[in-house]
Image (cartoon, rainbow, N blue to C red):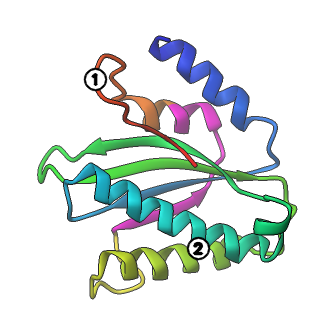
Amino acid sequence: MNKNQFFDQFLSEIRPFKTTYFLTLNTFINDQIIFERHLEKLFNQLNKYCFGRSFKRNNKRLKILGAKQIGIFNETLHCHLVIAHNNDMKRSHQEIEYLIRKNWLGILKTKSKISSNLIKFEEINNLSDVMFYSLRELKFNKTQNYLAF
């Protein structure tokens, strides 16, 4: 699969959803295994928060797709993600953002303020532009650097 095919598949998976958010998570680490464990922990917490008992009983999940990247200046990992749902949960944009900020800073064990620039969370206006930005550095001849949760 080349980059354009992946981009098209990515868009086709996200477009049916009614609500989409763009999330950038920065770290101070460069170990990919630890980074992915941190992400899994965060998204497990987020799914439990958004769907409550339906998370386990009915296997309800947010659709989360994106790419991990290595920072240019400090060579630490970060990721750009699209989070999507069909308005079938009772959490607002602000509630989701607060939970992500609080839990991500806790997972990283940092004393940064809740308004830290380690996290950027916003609603998506133009899905294609966000996807292009998120996937711009994907290299399909190297180790897997795209994410799906």
Q: Residues within 10 Å of mark 1 (few under 14, many from 20)?
A: few
In magenta segment, residue 119: yes
Name which residue type carries label 2: Gln
Quadrant of residue 127 in the image?
top right
Considering only vertical position in the picture, is 136 above or below 89?
Answer: above
In terms of secondary structure, where does tag 1 sit? loop
- Disc number for residue 142: 1
Left or right relative to 62: residue 98: left
Quadrant of residue 57 in the image?
bottom right
- Residue at x 31%, y 75% (from the top left corner): 108
Left or right relative to 70: residue 61: right
Single out the residue that lies furthest toward the front: 57
User: Which residue corresponds to mark 2?
Assistant: 45
- Residue at x 59%, y 73% (from the top left corner): 45
- Disc number for residue 62: none
Left or right relative to 126: residue 139: left
Residue 142, image x, y percentages: 28, 23
Residue 25, image x, y percentages: 40, 60
Of the pair 35 and 80, the residue shown nearer to us: 35
Q: How crowded is mark 2: few (under 14 residues within 10 Å), some or many (20 or more)?
A: some
Name which residue type carries label 1: Lys
Residue 90, image x, y percentages: 83, 74
Considering only vertical position in the picture, is 3 above or below 130?
Answer: above
- Residue at x 28%, y 63% (from the top left corner): 27
Residue 14, image x, y percentages: 70, 37
**1 and 2 marks in contact (CB < 8 Å):** no
Of the pair 118 and 39, the residue shown nearer to us: 39
Counting residues from the start of the chain, the first of labels 1 and 2 encountered is: 2
In magenta segment, residue 129: yes
Mark 1 → mark 2, Cα distance in angstroms: 30 Å
- Residue at x 54%, y 34% (from the top left corner): 131
Residue interval drawn in magenta = 118-131
